[in-house]
Amino acid sequence: MDFTISEKMQAILALINEFVDRELIPLEREFATKSFAQMEPTLNAKRDMVKKMELWAPNHPVEYGGMGLTLVEHGLVSEALGRSPLGHYVFGCHAPDAGNAEILALHGSKEQKEKYLAPIIDGRIRSCFSMTEVDLPGSNPVMLDTTAVKDGGNYVINGHKWYTTAADGAKFAIVMAVTNPEQPPYLRASMIIVPTDTPGFNLVRNIPVMGHAGDGYFSHAEILYQNCVVPQENLLGGEGHGFVIAQERLGPGRIHHCMRWLGICNRAFDLMCHRACHRQMGPGKTLASKQIVQQWVADCAAKIQAARLMVLHAAWAMETKGHKEARDEVSMIKFVVANTMSEVVDKALQVHGGLGMTDDTVLAFFFRHERAARIYDGADEVHKVSLARRILKRYENISVR
């Protein structure tokens, strides 16, 4: 394994880090107090700057208007962009559009690609991914109550979803629904494209997350599908292949998430160390002189480095060995990096004291919105159990001396 960064990538990362520092971080105070609708013109102007710099859509293929970076390269970009909540959106590699675009590129028909993929990658429209249901475990995607029943040439969709991220203002949703209830669990569900202006697509509310409902891209919606009718040509991929496609989406997505979380770790760590060095605790003494703070700094630095190397290795394994062979590595990074981020953000907030609880720094935003990292894309406990079972199974029929 050679994680040497090419000169080209070093130049790209330098440009991105400079852009984040000069153009995005200064916007965060405004972002904390304004709605997405109020911020959108400013964010669109920043997006135009990114496109002129030819740094737009780093994770997407060149033929679709992206930079065509490898998984490892985009991981490094994601780490740089993760330092600001605005980074991924402004550079056109934000979830859920990034994952939806990957699905459309792999499984979409020619017509679907023209209608939905091209405008997503260009940043002209937004989309959402509607899988998690209110009364069923989101960590088990084969358990779904939402149905899509054939009626002539259409599907009639009924169901209740929530945590449909960025549905507010999205042009379409990719919906996981049961189309083949008679099949085995992993072959029952399909993915179907549903334009959000379809009758029966009802955005009930943006769910308040720790007191903040958000709006536009920065929101999570509750959706009620009531006799929502779409043509059967809106089926994405093969009927009954929803679970398989979802797994294809989640693997690279977890790499992206983990590198973004490491960007958050880096930002929180920088803020913590700066605060420790400048916060006066008495004549000639700062927080940095306290041994407990020194211990936090050392622990966080070591854990960030360990987590980073794990993610780079997982990305390398996925690229060289494939999704199936990299399952263990991907499971490990999901819970290791999520917990590392939680600890670093928490320690940074603690060092900031009362200031950390306000929106005068980005730490409170990270604390509110990133705690869910240990839940979404499979709760930590699920990943640990699955990983342990796979590891233990290898020892069932071997002798160890």
Image: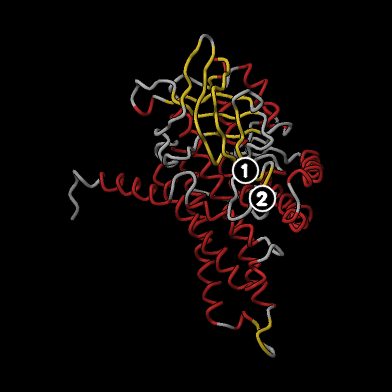
Query: Left or right: where does residue 36 sit relative to residue 399?
Result: right
Query: Left or right: where does residue 138 sit relative to residue 116?
Result: left
Q: Residues within 10 Å of mark 1 (few under 14, many from 20)?
A: many
Front-most of residues 100 and 299: 100
Q: CA distance from mark 1 to mark 2?
A: 25 Å
Disc assigned to residue 313: none
Query: Left or right: where does residue 350 sit relative to residue 217?
Result: left
Q: Which residue in the protein does label 2 denote?
A: 81
Q: Position of residue 231 (x, y in %)?
A: 57, 15
Residue 221 drawn above or below residue 335: above
Three-letter amino acid code of the residue under disc 1: Asn
Q: Residues within 10 Å of mark 2 (few under 14, many from 20)?
A: many
Q: Position of residue 367 (x, y in %)?
A: 58, 59
Residue at the top extreme?
152
Disc assigned to residue 206: 1
Residue 152 drawn above or below residue 259: above
Q: Count every numbered label the image shows and give the total.
A: 2
The image quadrant of residue 53 is top right
